[in-house]
Image (cartoon, helix red, strand yellow):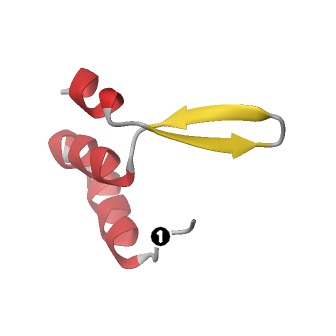
């Protein structure tokens, strides 16, 4: 699961560094699988927040 999610990662410029992170949809998938209360709350917030950039 993580390998597939990481293959679809996104790269952002942060100061003078390139930072690679899982995509928003990948993060939601991982949090759904974990299923902890905080993860479920995070998913709700992620789905409500507009995307930046």
Q: Is residue 14 left or right of residue 29?
A: right
x, y percentage for residue 16? 83, 35
x, y percentage for residue 10? 47, 41
To which residue does mark 1 refer? Answer: 51
User: Relative to 10, is 5 above or below?
Assistant: above
Count the labels in the image: 1
x, y percentage for residue 37? 27, 55
Q: Residue at x 38, y 66 (%)?
A: 46
Q: Secondary structure at mark 1?
A: loop
Q: Is residue 1 left or right of residue 52?
A: left
Q: Residue 26's quadrant in the figure?
A: top left
Q: Residue at x 44, y 75 (%)?
A: 49
Q: Residue at x 26, y 26 (%)?
A: 2
x, y percentage for residue 21? 49, 37
User: Relative to 3, is 52 above or below?
Assistant: below
The quadrant of the image that shows the N terminus is top left
| Outermost residue to the right | 16
Q: Is residue 4 left or right of residue 38?
A: left
Crowding at label 1, few (<14), some or many (≥20) Cα neighbours within 10 Å?
few
């Amino acid at each position: 699961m993580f390998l597939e999610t990481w293959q679809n990662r996104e790269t952002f410029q942060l100061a003078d560094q390139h930072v690679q992170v899982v995509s928003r949809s990948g993060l939601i998938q991982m949090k759904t699988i974990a299923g902890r209360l905080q993860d479920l709350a995070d998913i709700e917030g992620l789905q409500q927040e507009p995307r930046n950039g």
